Amino acid sequence: MTMIAERVLPLSGIHNFRDYGGYAVEGGGRLRSGILWRSAHHQEATSDDLDTVDTLGIETVVDLRGDDERALHPCKRSENFSARVLFADGNTAGLAPHLQAAGGTIDNDTARSRMVDVYAGMPYRPALVNTLRLYLSALAEYDAPSLVHCVAGKDRTGFAVAVVHRLLGVHEDDLMHDYLLTNTAGKIEERIAQGGNAIRARYGAEIHDDAIRTLMSVNPIFLDAALATVRRDHGDVATYAEAVLNFTPEMHEALVDKLVVY
C-alpha cells in the first residue's frame, strides 16, 4: 500500500491534495499513480501551489461544488492553466438544509447524525449525479491526469472517489483507507479551523467545537451510509453506476485500459 507521504502534495493553500491511484485491483494489476488526483478547492492557492499543480499535467478538472459555492470560492488558476473544467449547474451540497433546520445549539451527536443523513442521500443528489456522469465520461475519454474536488475534498469528493475505486476493482478496505486519509493529510487543524469559521458565519448557529471537528472530518459511518443506499437500491456500485450515472460496459473497458497497469 502506498504510504501517505507519497500520496499527499504538501501545498500551502490547497488542502487535501492527493493521488488516489496506486491501489491494487481485483484480478491483478493496480491503478496508475500520478493520474488520479483529488483535493479541496483552490481559492487560497499560492503562486507556488499553482506552479506545483501545473507540473502534474492535469487536463481535466471536475468541480463537484454547486453554483453558490463556485461563486463564493472561485478557484485560482495559473497563467498556464488550460485544463477543461467540468461541472453541472445547480447546487450539490447537502448539509445546508440540515444545519439551517437544526436551530439552537448543534452538538457533536447532532452533527454526526446530520452527516450520516447527508451521505445517505448523496447518491441521488441531482446536480451531483450530473457532475459524476461528466467525471466518469471524462475518465473514459481522456488518457491524461485529472483532478476531482469539492470544497473540503472529503464528502462529495470522497463519494466520487469511492465510486471510481469500486468500478475499477479497488478493495473496500483500500477504498476506506483512502477516504480516511482526509483526517491525516496536510494541515488538518488549519483546515478544520477555516471550515469552522465558514460554517459558523454561514449558518449563524452555535456549533460546539467537537461538532465542527466532526463536520470537517470523515468517519467510516458517513461513507458507509452512502454505500448502503447504493446497495439497498442497486446491489452494488457497478449496477448503481449503470442505472444512475449512465456508465456503460464500454466506458468500464476504457477506464480499465487507461487507469490499470499490470
Image (tube, helix red, strand yellow):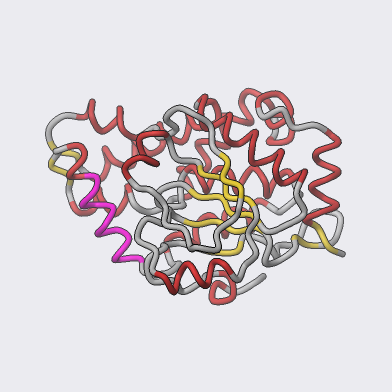
Q: Quadrant of the C terminus?
A: bottom right
Is residue 10 left or right of 148 when viewed as pictured?
Answer: left
Q: Main secondary structure of the magenta part?
A: helix
Q: Is residue 30 left or right of residue 110?
A: right
Horizontal and vertical percent position of residue 96 = 31, 32
Q: Is residue 239 above or below residue 199?
A: above
- State the residue at coordinates (54%, 67%): 53
Task: Check residue 194 for magenta coloring.
Answer: yes
Q: Which residues are magenta?
A: 188-199
Q: Is residue 92 above or below residue 233?
A: below
Q: Quadrant of residue 111?
A: top left
Q: Residue at x 39, y 41 (%)?
A: 70
Q: Is residue 239 above or below residue 1?
A: above
Q: For the image shown, how many numbered marks are present on the structure?
A: 0
Q: Position of residue 78 (x, y in %)?
A: 48, 63
Give whichever of 185, 73 is nearer the camera. 73
Residue at the limit of the structure toward the front, as seen here: 79
Q: Residue at x 24, y 45 (%)?
A: 199
Q: Position of residue 219 (x, y in %)?
A: 43, 50
Q: Can you tell which quarter of the image residue 54 is in? A: bottom right
Which quarter of the image is occupied by the N terminus?
bottom right
Quadrant in the picture for residue 237: top right
Residue drawn 41% across and 62% down?
A: 15
Task: Give the image location of residue 28, x and y in percent.
Answer: 85, 60
Q: Within the magenta stretch, is there residue 31?
A: no
